[in-house]
Amino acid sequence: MNTDKEKWILLVVLSLIWGSSFILIKKSLDHFNPYQVGALRVLIAGIILMPVAISKYKLFPKKHVKWLILAAFTGNFIPMFLFPIAETEVSSSIAGIINSMMPIFVIVVGALVWKFETTQRQMVGTFISFTGVCLLAFGGAGEEGQFKLIPILLLLLATLCYAVSTTTVKSKLMEVSSTVLSAFVFSFVLFFPSLIALTFTGFFSTFSLDENHLTGLMFVSLLSIFGTGLAMMMNYRLLKVSSPLFASTVTLLMPIVAIIWGVLDGEKLSVMQFIGAGIIIAGLIFLRAKPNVIQK
């Protein structure tokens, strides 16, 4: 498969997986507190990927360990807590919508930190799509006109963290395969921090094999296996065959998936949000035109 076709397949599949993660967070919060949801999400991914990490330990990028730690905590630890905390105050649809600001943060972080060059067409396409994101965010009927600042800021911080991680991986960790990189991140770097966080939340002293906790564990496991472990492998692969900006455009399609799940779960959708979704897709089509790789 040629890389141009592969990157678009990865983009669509990741949009479906990550777009579904917000409703899984919402369902998990019915059974665990937000700190437990975040810690469990990381811990389960670490347990699943541990055999890969151990078998490939010789490939651990020792000379780039500081970049691995930075990418791990900004991309796969801090946001895992910020999103559940925010979703105690806002809907899963709005969480998916705010996450769509990631391409903007990628442009800013890439330019300021890594000196990435971005084409005018990429920026125009991204801002067209972001216009659609704004319509999705402010044209919704489900939030009853309430604009809650603190959870929105938490979501923006999480999105900024994702941008830092994405540009760090593209700049410093491309020599490591996507599967191995994911295994190292969750099993070597984040396993014990997530275990410690889970301990301090009181999870081990309160967890029981009752229907409530087992149902919650099922939702978190789905979130961890697909939305964290598998999705991060695919994301790292997408970064290898495209650019940080292109990879970040997955967050422009995710709100559509998130809103669909939200509607199915009883969240309301306005005509303005339908229009916003169409504008997002239009921006992505515009963005697709070559060249679409950021060079250093």
Image (spheres, helix red, strand yellow):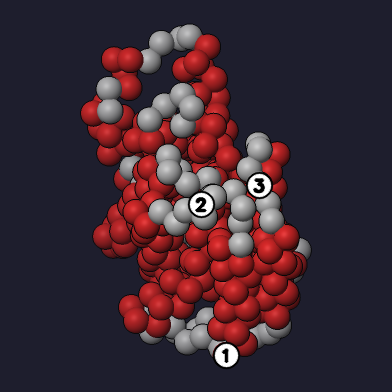
Residue in the image at 32% along x and 22% along y? 203
Sequence-wise first label, 1 or 3: 1
Name the spot of residue 106 as percent of width and height, x first. 45, 72
Task: Tell me the residue that label 3 is attached to.
Answer: 268
Name the amino acid, label 1: Gln
Q: How many marks?
A: 3
- Packing grade of label 3 (10 A; few <14, some 14-19, many >=20) is some
Residue in the image at 47% along x and 53% along y? 146
Tell me: 62 left or right of 58: left
Kindly tell me whether residue 55 is visible in this rendering.
no
Name the spot of residue 290 as percent of width and height, x first. 68, 84
* Disc 1 secondary structure class: helix
Quarter holding residue 218:
top right
Q: Which mark is residue 95?
A: 2
- Between disc 1 and disc 2, the foreground one is 2
Name the amino acid, label 2: Ala
Task: Tell me the residue that label 1 is attached to.
Answer: 120
Outermost front residue: 145
In three-dimensional space, the C-alpha distance between marks 1 and 3, rounded to whole angstroms, equals: 36 Å
- Between disc 1 and disc 3, the foreground one is 3
Sequence-wise first label, 3 or 2: 2
